[in-house]
Image: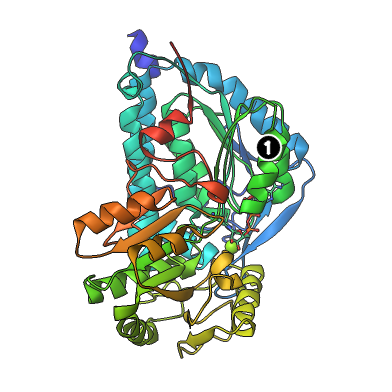
Amino acid sequence: MAAKKKTRPPEKTVPAAPPGNDFRLGEPYAPAPEATDHARIAPAYGLFINGAFVSAASGKRFPTVNPATEATLSEVSEAGPGDVDKAIAAARKAFGPWNRLKASERGKYLFRIARLLQERAREFAVIESMDGGKPIRESRDFDVPQAAAHFFYHGGWADKLAYAFPGRKIAPVGVAGQIIPWNFPLLMAAWKIAPALACGNTVVLKPAESTPLTALKLAELLADAGLPPGVVNIITGAGDTGAALVNHPGIDKIAFTGSTEVGKQIQRAVAATGKRHTLELGGKAAHIIFDDAPVDQAVEGIINGIFFNQGHVCCAGSRLLVQEGVAETIVAKLRRRMENLVLGDPLDKNTDIGAIHSRAQLERIEALVRAGVEEGACIHQSGQTLPAKGYWFRPTIFTETAQSHRINREEIFGPVLSVMTFRTPDEAIEKANNTPYGLSGGVWTDKGAKIFGVTGALRAGVLWANTFNKFDPASPFGGYKESGLGREGGLHGLAAYVNLSR
Ligand code: NAI
Ligand code: MG
């Protein structure tokens, strides 16, 4: 009966409020002003360290707002260096037992987490849309199911690593520090946590300061799943907290998704420390349409490629390259389609374009769009009425753009597409590769040979043919050049969380 000790309690159903994340123990639970039955948001959250929510040593907290209403949703704790230290110590202590646990048992935890995510999908979707501004249709149909899929997928790998790396000795890396951005908060948490745990590592994860709520909900879920304390620690804070995590000597690996600028800082910080690192950074994908492409499908692909998640997507198809013969038709259809996009309340299931994630991001988008106009590109904006409160930007297309324009060189990270034309496949390839980034790209054509010829010549980590923005946990994702290094997902993603030897 010794084995019995190892089996975990059965899954709990969603507990009634209070959700147990209001760390001000002893105070009666009062839901946050915007909380509903479908989104139980506490008025304040602690740091999730060693399986429990605790206050930051400094007691400091900061608000997270709903970008569609500008209302404060909740206050989260700001982890200082002492808190980071505590979280890493908890992860270190948990590492040995977690790593020694039978691999199939580790897998069971991942499956349990995946199933709980499915059960609580609605709440996660609603909170994701409230905290970050993305349309509920996307959080419901994409972010949450994909997050669950990542836990299922990696749960499957946990006891099959010997097949992933045949003939090699496999050891976990140790304690992983993980820093994620605000554009896919829950999904990026899943991308980071699932492979780390499958391979026997423990984790300290920091969500973005503007979208911490689904990661904190995930912390609640991990506790409900019976995950041993310290295996995953979730600490909130901004860049300083992230830097404290990166610079701490107690981590063995850093996994980062975010801006190229911060990625470069991290790479400098870990140089010669022996810390493993993977970086998923910005992008400026070329979306190439040949004149033999199925036009209407391509138009839908282009719209999805740039307007998905308001264009807050590192692999967004932000540079459209259209072959001259179809350019006029494609642009006319795009402009018509753009007018029909529904912009507004992210919680309305008909919404296509939600809120811009923050005031700062809105200002960045506006500045680059101004630059596009000033540099002589021709701007087309749709005519939707913008809500009075919140941060919004109309779907925008630039034509007559040059490769030298800032809108073609810099990541806008907003609903803004710039269009260029080309005559030959070689010209398309040359223009597509003329960027410091190399994350993703897409090609639309009727000819298989052209797909292989062109994609083979594109220097980008993720390539789509006759589709765009399609994801699967089994496909590795990552970039070349200033888009980062390392891959997440698939076998390549697992490799980032193991040390291999003969
Ligand atoms: P950011 O890179 O500052 O933020 C990403 C994450 O890094 C957040 O969790 C943040 O707290 C953390 N962070 C910030 N400074 C850090 C530091 N010195 N050390 C460790 N962690 C740190 O991105 P930001 O400022 O929110 O967005 C700026 C631009 O970056 C966007 O306009 C977009 O172009 C790009 N971006 C790209 C993303 C991607 O998925 N590749 C995601 C987010 C932003
Ligand atoms: Mg927010």
Looking at the rendered structure, the secondary structure element under dot 1 is: helix
> What is the three-letter code of the residue carrying label 1?
Val
Q: Is mark 1 within 8 Å of ligand 1?
A: yes
Could you tell me which quadrant the C terminus lies in? top left
- Left/right of residue 253 with respect to residue 15 in the rendered view: right
Q: Residue furthest right?
A: 58
Question: In the depicted view, which residue is nearer to us: 72 or 275?
Answer: 275
Q: Image quadrant for the N terminus?
A: top left
Query: Looking at the image, is 369 positioned above or below residue 131?
Result: below
Give the class, few, some or many, for how many residues have Cα within 10 Å of label 1's Cα (few <14, many ≥20).
Answer: many
**Percent coordinates x, y for residue 314 in the rendering:** 50, 57
Q: Is residue 11 visible?
A: no
For residue 467, side relative to residue 65 (left or right): left
Position of 397 relative to 83 (above/below): below
**Residue drawn at (67%, 49%), measured in percent from left and top?**
262
Q: Quadrant of residue 409?
A: bottom right
Image quarter where ligand 1 lies? bottom right
For this rendering, which residue is in front, 275 or 207? 275
Q: Give the quarter of the image for residue 37.
A: bottom left
Observer-nearest residue: 129 or 331? Answer: 331
Residue 155, position as x, y percentages in the image:
34, 32
Residue under label 1, please give it.
246
- The residue positioned 72% from the left and 34% from the top of the image is 247
- x%, y% of residue 243? 72, 42
Name the residue located 73 percent from the left edge and 53 percent from the top edge.
61
Q: Judge from the rendering whether residue 3 lies leftward or rightward of residue 229; answer left or right.
A: left
> How many badges with numbers are in the image?
1
